[in-house]
């Protein structure tokens, strides 16, 4: 819904009905989007067996989805500046649920890959506009907190997708697992349709190519935004590399878990929901520049813990890594539209570019995880992930010395 009224609302405040509706709706939308996005991750060993493909090839069922999502974000972000945020969110969730159900009925491997690629395209509508919508519709004091809550929903969605797929897949096969998650998508789409308030502060941008080019150039030349895009790419690449390969490790003779039991390790994901919300509050108190490097350090510690052989220590490492990753992502994803808006850059465009980097990292390094596993087993996967987190930490150090564009915020 586009509003061009002369009076601009200062945004919903904590305790108001509108704030609660937005928080609940975007939490549900995050659950649906990331449950569908990562629905095949816990099923990779079964997909490899069912379709007689290699471990590296099985990761294409996830990597192609994130490729489609990343590319579609480059269109969805600018499109939302013209058409509006809520319209794109509703369309994205509805189409994604339909494609998810179609994936469950895919007659062959290549058809499944094609549908998963299409799923990435349909999923792009929500992440492209979620943080921009929050910054437009909520009071500025709540931006970091609300962004953390939304990322918490994505963490829960990631857990739901991986855990439900693993358990249902173990009991009834991968088709029923994907069908179950498709129904989750339908339920969340209906909930968002009923709850999400229409935009009050959105003002449509001119539908002109020169305006799009100008906004894109500005979003690609700000040093702080470029560092945030790269942090998103590196940290998600590290996180997804570990998540893609962990199923192969846990179902290997070394550990010997079943597919369903291996999927239970994703029960650590609610820790990400909590850590992202806490990180948002800490960022309000101590600044984003302080919290992001701390999140990188926590992520690195968790990855190194997974080198241990005892299963409880491996699970502990996954939990610590998850907490650290969602600290970084929860703060960085909210920082992007805040910095963009302060610098006169279209927030939807900047958020889309951050997420393009985020999912590019997921696609590239998530696929490399399969190759690393085949080449050097778990130590090779850990090496890949550690290098990426160290790069993210270095970029966070650069951000500490990058001037803020908003004199009232840190």
Image: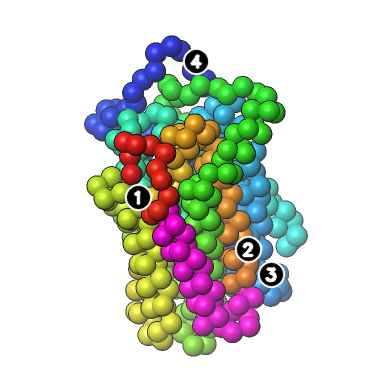
Judging by the rendered image, the residue that carries numbered circle 1 is 288
409 lies above or below 360: above
Question: Which circle's residue, 4 or 1, is located before the other in the chain?
Answer: 4
**Residue displayed at 57% across by 29% down:** 81
The part of the chain drawn in magenta is 370-399
Question: x, y (%) of residue 87?
Answer: 55, 28
Question: Which circle's residue, 2 or 4, is located before the other in the chain?
Answer: 4
**Residue displayed at 33% across by 39% down:** 409
Q: Are marks 3 and 2 in contact (CB under 8 Å)?
A: no
Question: Which circle's residue, 3 or 2, is located before the other in the chain?
Answer: 3
Judging by the rendered image, the residue that carries numbered circle 4 is 4
Real-space Cα distance between discs 3 and 2? 13 Å
The answer to whether any part of residue 38 appears in the image is no
317 lies above or below 18: below
Q: Residue furthest top?
A: 6
Question: x, y (%) of residue 394?
Answer: 45, 64
Which mark, by number, is residue 57? 3
* Quadrant of the snapshot with the C terminus: top left
**Residue displayed at 33% across by 56% down:** 291
Judging by the rendered image, the residue that carries numbered circle 2 is 364
Q: Nearer the viewer, mark 3 or mark 4?
A: 4
Q: Is 375 contained in the magenta span?
A: yes
């Amino acid at each position: 819904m586009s509003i061009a009224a002369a009076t601009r609302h200062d945004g919903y405040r904590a305790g108001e009905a509108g704030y609660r509706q937005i928080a609940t709706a975007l939490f549900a939308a995050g659950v649906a989007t990331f449950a569908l996005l990562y629905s095949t991750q816990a099923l990779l060993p079964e997909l490899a067996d069912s379709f007689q493909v290699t471990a590296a090839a099985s990761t294409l069922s996830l990597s192609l989805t994130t490729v489609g999502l990343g590319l579609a974000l480059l269109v969805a972000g600018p499109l939302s500046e013209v058409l509006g945020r809520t319209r794109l969110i509703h369309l994205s969730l509805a189409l994604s649920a339909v494609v998810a159900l179609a994936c469950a009925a895919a007659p062959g491997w290549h058809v499944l890959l094609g549908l998963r690629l299409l799923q990435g395209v349909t999923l792009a509508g929500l992440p492209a506009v979620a943080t921009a919508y929050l910054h437009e519709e909520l009071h500025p004091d709540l931006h970091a907190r609300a962004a953390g809550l939304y990322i918490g929903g994505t963490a829960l969605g990631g857990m739901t997708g991986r855990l439900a797929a693993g358990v249902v897949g173990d009991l009834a096969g991968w088709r029923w697992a994907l069908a179950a998650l498709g129904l989750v998508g339908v339920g969340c789409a209906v909930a968002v349709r009923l709850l999400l308030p229409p935009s009050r502060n959105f003002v449509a941008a001119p539908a002109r190519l020169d305006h799009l080019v100008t906004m894109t150039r500005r979003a690609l030349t700000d040093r702080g935004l470029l560092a945030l895009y790269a942090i998103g790419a590196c940290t998600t690449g590290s996180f997804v590399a570990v998540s893609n390969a962990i199923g192969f490790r846990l179902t290997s003779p070394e550990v010997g878990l079943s597919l369903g039991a291996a999927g239970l390790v994703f029960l650590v994901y609610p820790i990400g929901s909590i850590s992202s919300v806490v990180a948002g509050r800490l960022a309000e108190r101590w600044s984003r520049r302080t919290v992001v490097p701390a999140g990188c350090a926590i992520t690195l510690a968790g990855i190194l813990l997974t080198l241990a052989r005892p299963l409880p220590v491996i699970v502990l490492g996954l939990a610590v890594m998850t907490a650290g990753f969602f600290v970084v992502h929860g703060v960085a994803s909210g920082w992007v539209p805040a910095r963009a808006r302060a610098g006169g850059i279209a927030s939807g465009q900047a958020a889309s570019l951050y997420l393009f980097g985020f999912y590019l990292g997921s696609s590239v390094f998530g696929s490399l995880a399969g190759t690393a596993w085949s080449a050097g087993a778990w130590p090779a996967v850990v090496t890949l992930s550690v290098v990426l987190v160290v790069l993210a930490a270095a970029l966070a150090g650069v951000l500490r010395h990058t001037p803020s564009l908003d004199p009232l915020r840190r």
